[in-house]
Image (spheres, rainbow, N blue to C red):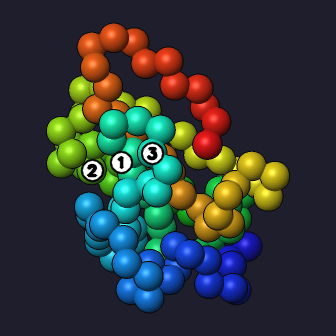
Amino acid sequence: MVNTVDSVFTKIIKREIPAKIHFEDEDFIVIDDLYPKAPVHVLIIPKQPYASLEAVPIEDVQFAHRLLSTARKVASQLGISDNYKLFMNVGEKVQAVHHLHLHLMGGYSKEKSQLTFQE
C-alpha cells in the first residue's frame, strides 16, 4: 500500500521540510536520523511512499537490489563500508514514520558495538 497522506519523509523529498541530504537519485534520498543511535546514522528512504516493506509488491524483485545497492554506495561515501549495520522496522506498531526507510548505522570504534535493534 502506498501512503496517500504525506509523511514527514515525503515532505523532505518535496523540500517542504529541510534535512541534511547525503545522497539522492531518482529512487532514494538519504538523510540524517534526527535521533542517532550510532556515530553515523542515516535513513535511506525510497521516494515511492510505501507505508512499509509489506507494501512493496513482491514482484518488484529489483526494489531490494536497489535499496541494498544504495546502502552500500552511501556506506562507502560516508567512510563506513568496513563496519556498519542495516535495519528496518516493519508495521504500524514498530514504525515511528509510516513511510518505508532503512537505517544505516556505522562509524563505531574498534570495540564491538553494544547497539540493540530498537529504534
Q: Residue at x 69, y 85 (%)?
A: 5
Tag 3 residue: 36
Farthest-out residue, front? 35
- Judging by the rendered image, the residue that carries numbered circle 2 is 74
Please give left or right for residue 93 compared with residue 17 in the image.
right
Q: Which residue position is annotated with label 1?
A: 71
Residues at marks 2 and 1, CA–CA distance in whole angstroms: 5 Å
* Quadrant (top left/top right/bottom left/bottom right) for the C terminus: top right
Q: Where is residue 85 in the image (x, y as percent from the top left)?
A: 43, 32
Q: Give left or right: position of 23 versus 119.
A: left
Q: Are marks 2 and 1 in contact (CB under 8 Å)?
A: yes
**Viewer-nearest of labels 3 and 1?**
3
Who comes first in sequence, dot 3 or dot 2? 3
Q: What element carries label 1?
A: helix
Where residue 81 sits, quadrant-wise, is top left
| Amino acid type of the residue tagged 1 in the rendering | Ala
Residue appearing at x 33%, y 11% in the figure: 111
